[in-house]
Image (tube, rainbow, N blue to C red):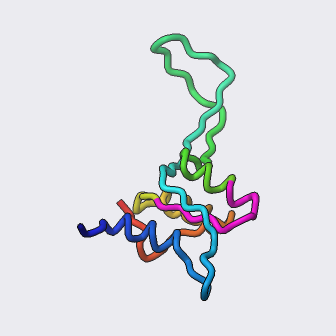
Amino acid sequence: PRLSKTTTTALKMATTTNEQKQQQRIVVVGSTNQDLISNTNILPTLGETVMGDTFTTACGGKGANQAVAAASLGFVPVSMLCRVGDDIFGKNLLDNFRRVGVEFDEESTVLS
């Protein structure tokens, strides 16, 4: 049976050979998302809408958080296999991976 492009990419990222020895690597397949955070001093009641005092964004997602945590340990290279949007949030997520040392295949990254 033929392997999907996603499976082929994951295998390629996971199996880097160095002459006779295979290099160890962590590959995370999971979600990544841009968190949109608003803070308020008011605890809303059921159905009530309140205005936030501040607004920030942060990179998150179960898979992305695991990849960033593993990369911060620095024991082995870490790669992330995920889908990101073809928008400012997707660009920010990929920039964050670059900044913290999480690898991803730029040519195979699926912008959806």
Residue 71 painted magenta: yes
Observer-nearest of 32 and 43 = 32
Give the residue at x 60% y 88%: 19
Observer-nearest of 10 and 111 = 10
Vertical comparison of 103 with 53: above or below? below
Spot occupied by residue 29 in the image (x, y as percentages of width and height): 48, 55
Give the residue at x 46% y 74%: 12
Which stretch appears magenta?
A: 70-81
Residue 9 painted magenta: no
Judged left or right of residue 93, residue 109 is left
Give the residue at x 51% y 71%: 13
Residue 72, image quadrant: bottom right
**Location of the C terminus (image quadrant):** bottom left
Residue 75, image quadrant: bottom right
Observer-nearest of 43 and 27 = 27
Give the residue at x 42% y 70%: 9
Spot occupied by residue 102 in the image (x, y as percentages of width and height): 62, 65
